[in-house]
Image (cartoon, rainbow, N blue to C red):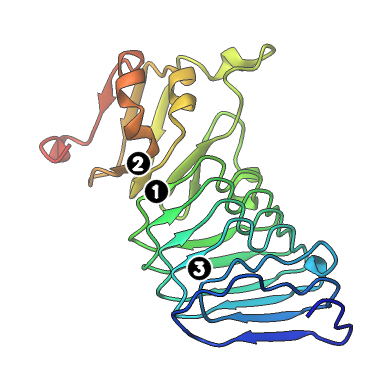
């Protein structure tokens, strides 16, 4: 469908057979319905025109870089069978302000929403157990945090704002007390950040122990750099 100058709406009907090779180069798409797994990737020529994307309930994963650079995208609906949002899937979608990730999703891979500068309203379903490095880097959620703070998206701790490695000023972030706020469900923090922060103590205010994802996988490498973990007294046994 390359070069269909008047084609603005595409519907790929629901189905279980994967679709490959879907290309719409130089077609000014605005509205897309994807009803099955596909390697659909918009070309540079139509990325800015896409405004609305609906992922149907037969789709199980959103492909790598699927909507990368769709700067005009403002409305995304993700179906309730999607389990994985792959890396760079919505990277650079600067028009996106909100997204709801359904309870079916378990994995959000690295850089999935990186650079979505206006994305501030995110709901993350309770089945998500892994959020990759940089998944929300440069989003409104990230940018609205102060330097030296943990970055939360919904009830998930996903990043640290600041560069502990920086030659000029990195020391300001190291060897400090870090706080995990009340109600945190998931900690999916790059283990390299924790190793470089080397916190003297971590204070968890969450009565229910959060799920440890990325951070947990690096525990063996940085455990000796954490001075002390403090938890609520009535939750000691749970931890």
Please give the name of the residue rendered at 76% of the width and 79% of the height, measured from the top-left corner. Answer: 30
Q: Position of residue 93 (x, y in %)?
A: 71, 59
Sequence-first tag of 3 and 1: 3
Horizontal placement of 82 versus 111: left or right? left
Please give the name of the residue rendered at 68% of the width and 54% of the height, measured from the top-left corner. Answer: 116
Sequence-first tag of 2 and 3: 3
Please give the name of the residue rendered at 17% of the width and 36% of the height, measured from the top-left corner. Answer: 239
Crowding near pointer 2: few (<14 within 10 Å), some, many (20+)? many
Camera-near label (2 vs 3) is 2
Question: Which disc, if any, is residue 130?
Answer: 1
Query: Is residue 154 depicted above or below 51 in this figure?
Result: above
Q: Which residue is identified by label 3?
A: 100
Camera-near label (3 vs 1) is 1
How far apart marks 2 and 3 lie (CA) works out to 21 Å
Task: Indicate the secondary structure of the residue bearing disc 3.
Answer: strand
Task: Indicate the secondary structure of the residue bearing disc 2.
Answer: loop
Q: Quadrant of the N terminus?
A: bottom right
Q: Position of residue 215 (x, y in %)?
A: 37, 33
User: Mark 2 and mark 1 in contact (Cβ < 8 Å)?
Assistant: yes
Task: Indicate the secondary structure of the residue bearing disc 1.
Answer: strand
Please give the name of the residue rendered at 52% of the width and 40% of the height, measured from the top-left corner. Answer: 133
Q: Nearer the viewer, residue 93 or 82?
A: 82
Does the image show residue 184? no
Crowding near pointer 3: few (<14 within 10 Å), some, many (20+)? some
Q: Position of residue 152 (x, y in %)?
A: 48, 46
Q: Which residue is identified by label 2?
A: 213
């Amino acid at each position: 469908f390359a070069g269909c100058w008047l084609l603005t709406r595409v519907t790929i009907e629901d189905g279980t057979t994967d679709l490959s090779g879907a290309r719409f180069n130089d077609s000014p798409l605005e509205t897309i319905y994807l009803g099955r797994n596909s390697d659909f990737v918009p070309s540079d020529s139509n990325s800015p025109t896409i405004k609305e994307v609906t992922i149907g309930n037969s789709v199980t994963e959103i492909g790598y870089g699927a909507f990368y650079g769709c700067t005009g995208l403002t409305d995304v609906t993700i179906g309730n069978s999607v389990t994985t949002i792959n890396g760079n899937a919505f990277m650079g979608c600067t028009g996106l302000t909100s997204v709801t990730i359904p309870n079916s999703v378990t994995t959000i891979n690295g850089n999935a929403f990186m650079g979505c500068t206006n994305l501030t309203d995110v709901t993350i379903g309770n089945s998500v157990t892994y959020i990759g490095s940089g998944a929300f880097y440069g989003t409104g959620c990230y940018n609205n945090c102060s330097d030296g703070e943990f970055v939360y998206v919904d009830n998930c701790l996903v990043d640290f704002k600041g560069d502990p490695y920086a030659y000029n000023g990195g020391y300001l972030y190291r060897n400090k007390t870090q706080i995990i706020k009340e109600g945190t469900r998931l900690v999916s923090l790059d283990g390299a950040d924790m190793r470089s922060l080397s916190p003297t103590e971590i204070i968890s205010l969450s009565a229910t122990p959060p799920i440890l994802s990325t951070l947990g996988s690096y525990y063996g490498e940085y455990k000796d750099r954490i001075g002390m973990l403090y938890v609520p007294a009535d939750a000691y046994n749970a931890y």
